[in-house]
Image: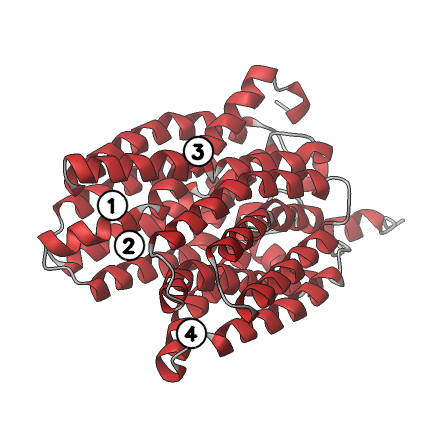
C-alpha cells in the first residue's frame, strides 16, 4: 500500500508505536543513574565501573547505529525493532543479576547500547517519516520526538519508588515490564515496512553509492559535523551541571530538578521545531538552535549561578534540546529521500555520539587540570556559534542521482 492508502487507524497505530518505543527506550536509559547508589552499596561495582559502562553504552550506540540503520533499510525496521526490544530486556536481566563489573558492563553497556540503536530516535524517525506525506513529515517527527521525553516521566518515578520500597532488583523487574510494553509497540511501528516508497525515494543506486554520494556532499558533511557539536554541548551539560552546581554551593537536588525541567520543556520544543520545520528552511532553524544554545550557555556560566537562573537556563535549554532531531532527519530526507534514511541518519548520529564522548570526557579533564569549567563552557560556546553559522549556510541542494542522469540522457538512435 502507499502512504495515501493508510487508514487513519493504521497511521495512528504506526505513529503511536514509534512514540511509545522511543519514549520507553529513552526513559529507562535516562533513569539508570538512580540505580547507582544502591548498586554500589550491594555489589563489587564501583563508581568508575558504573561510569565506564555508561560511556561504553554511548560509544556502542554511536558506532552500531549506521550498521543497524543499513540492516533496517535492507530488511525492514520491524525485525530490527523487535530484536532491539529483546536485547534491551536481556541487558536489564544482566544488570539485575550483576555482581561484577564485567556482567554489569555487558548489560548496561553492550546490550543497552545495541538496543538503543534499534529502538531510539534514528529508527523511530525513519518509521514516522514513511507514514505521512512529505508536507506533514517534519511536524510528525517533531511530535514523535516530543513523546520521547515523556518516558522519563514514567520511568524515573517508577524506578525511584521501587528502589526505595523494594530494592533496585525489583525496580529492574519493573523496567522489564516497560520493555514488555515496547514489544507490541515495535510490532505496530513495524507496519510501516508495508508502505510502498514514493518513486522519488526508490533510488537506482546501491547503499554504497548513496553513502559515497552523501560523504561527498558538502551539506551533509556540515550537517554531521554540526551534529557533533550538538552532542558535545548536551552531554557536557547533563554530565557536569550537577557538579558545577555543587561547586557553586547550591543544593544537590537542584541538578535533578533542572534536568527534569529540561525534559518537560523539550516536549514543547521538539514539537514546535518539527512544526516550524515544515514551514521554514530547516537549516536556518537548526543553525538557530545551535546559536541560541551557545548564547544560553554563555549567559548562564558568565554570571553566578542561583536557583532562579538555573531553572530559567534549564527551561531555555529544554526548549532547544531535541528540536534538532526532526530537523536533522528532515534534512537527510530532503537531500537523499527515504530509501536509505536510517543508514544516513545513523552515520550523522555517530558524529553526534563522538561529540557526546568529548563533552563528557573533555569537560572532566579540563576540570581536573584547571579546577573549574571556565575553558570547557567557553569552548562549547565558541564551537556552537561556529557550527550554527555553518549550519545556516549549508548546501541543501540534493545531489544529482545516477538514475536521474540516465533518464535525462537521450537514447541512442
Q: Nearer the viewer, residue 3 or 393?
A: 393
Q: Is residue 214 above or below residue 188?
A: below
Mark 2 vs mark 4: which is more N-terminal? Answer: 2
Q: Which residue is mark 3?
A: 78
> Secondary structure under badge 1?
helix
Contact (CB < 8 A) between labels 2 and 4? no
Question: Which of labels 2 and 3 is toward the front?
Answer: 2
Residue 246 place in picture, x, y as percent? 35, 64
Q: Is residue 13 visible?
A: yes
Query: Is the residue 335 above or below the residue 1 in the image?
Result: below
- Residue 29 vs residue 215: left or right? left
Where does label 4 land, which residue? 362
Label 2 crowd bin: few (<14), some (14–19), many (20+), radius 10 Å: many
Circle nearer the viewer, 3 or 4: 4
Nearer the observer: mark 3 or 1; the answer is 1
Quadrant location of residue 164? top left
| Res 295 → quadrant | bottom right
Q: Residue 91's mark? A: 1
* Quarter holding residue 185: top left
Q: CA distance from mark 3 to mark 1?
A: 20 Å
Q: Secondary structure at mark 2?
A: helix
The answer to whether mark 3 and mark 4 are in CB contact below 8 A is no
Q: Please say if the residues under marks 1 and 2 sit with CB atoms less than 8 Å apart.
A: yes
The location of residue 282, given as percent across then percent down, is: 72, 50
Amino acid at each position: 500500500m502507499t502512504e495515501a492508502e493508510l487508514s487513519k487507524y493504521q497511521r495512528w497505530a504506526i505513529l503511536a508505536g514509534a512514540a511509545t518505543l522511543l519514549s520507553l527506550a529513552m526513559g529507562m536509559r535516562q533513569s539508570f543513574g538512580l540505580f547507582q547508589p544502591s548498586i554500589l552499596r550491594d555489589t563489587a561495582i564501583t563508581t568508575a565501573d558504573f561510569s565506564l559502562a555508561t560511556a561504553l553504552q554511548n560509544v556502542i550506540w554511536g558506532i552500531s547505529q549506521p550498521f543497524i540503520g543499513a540492516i533496517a533499510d535492507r530488511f525492514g525496521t520491524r525485525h530490527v525493532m523487535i530484536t532491539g526490544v529483546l536485547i534491551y530486556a536481556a541487558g536489564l536481566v544482566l544488570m539485575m543479576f550483576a555482581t561484577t563489573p564485567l556482567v554489569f558492563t555487558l548489560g548496561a553497556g553492550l546490550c543497552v547500547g545495541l538496543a538503543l540503536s534499534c529502538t531510539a530516535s534514528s529508527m523511530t524517525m525513519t518509521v514516522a517519516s514513511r507514514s505521512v506525506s512529505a508536507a506533514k513529515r517534519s511536524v510528525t517527527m517533531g511530535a514523535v520526538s516530543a513523546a520521547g521525553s515523556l518516558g522519563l516521566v514514567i520511568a524515573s518515578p517508577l524506578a525511584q519508588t521501587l528502589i526505595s520500597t523494594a530494592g533496585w532488583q525489583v525496580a529492574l523487574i519493573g523496567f522489564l515490564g516497560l520493555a514488555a510494553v515496547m514489544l507490541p509497540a515495535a510490532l505496530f511501528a513495524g507496519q510501516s515496512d508495508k508502505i510502498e516508497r514514493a518513486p522519488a525515494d526508490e533510488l537506482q543506486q546501491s547503499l554504497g553509492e548513496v553513502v559515497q554520494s552523501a560523504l561527498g556532499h558538502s551539506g551533509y558533511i556540515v550537517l554531521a559535523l554540526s551534529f557533533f557539536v550538538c552532542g558535545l554541548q548536551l552531554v557536557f551539560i547533563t554530565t557536569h551541571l550537577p557538579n558545577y552546581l555543587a561547586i557553586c554551593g547550591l543544593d544537590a537536588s537542584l541538578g535533578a530538578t533542572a534536568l527534569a525541567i529540561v525534559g518537560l520543556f523539550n516536549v514543547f520544543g521538539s514539537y514546535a521545531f518539527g512544526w516550524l520545520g515544515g514551514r521554514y528552511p530547516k537549516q536556518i532553524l537548526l543553525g538557530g538552535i545551535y546559536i541560541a544554545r551557545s548564547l544560553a550557555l554563555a549567559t548562564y556560566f558568565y554570571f553566578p549561578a542561583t536557583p532562579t537562573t538555573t531553572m530559567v537556563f534549564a527551561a531555555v535549554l529544554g526548549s532547544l534540546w531535541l528540536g534538532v532531531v526532526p530537523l536533522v532527519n528532515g534534512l537527510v530526507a530532503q537531500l537523499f529521500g527515504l530509501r536509505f534514511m536510517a543508514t544516513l541518519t545513523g552515520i550523522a548520529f555517530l558524529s553526534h555520539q563522538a561529540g557526546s564522548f568529548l563533552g563528557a570526557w573533555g569537560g572532566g579533564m579540563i576540570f581536573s587540570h584547571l579546577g573549574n569549567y571556565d575553558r570547557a563552557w567557553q569552548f562549547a560556546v565558541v564551537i556552537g556559534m561556529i557550527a550554527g553559522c555553518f549550519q545556516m549556510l549549508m548546501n541543501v541542494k540534493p545531489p544529482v542521482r545516477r538514475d536521474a542522469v540516465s533518464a535525462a540522457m537521450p537514447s541512442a538512435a
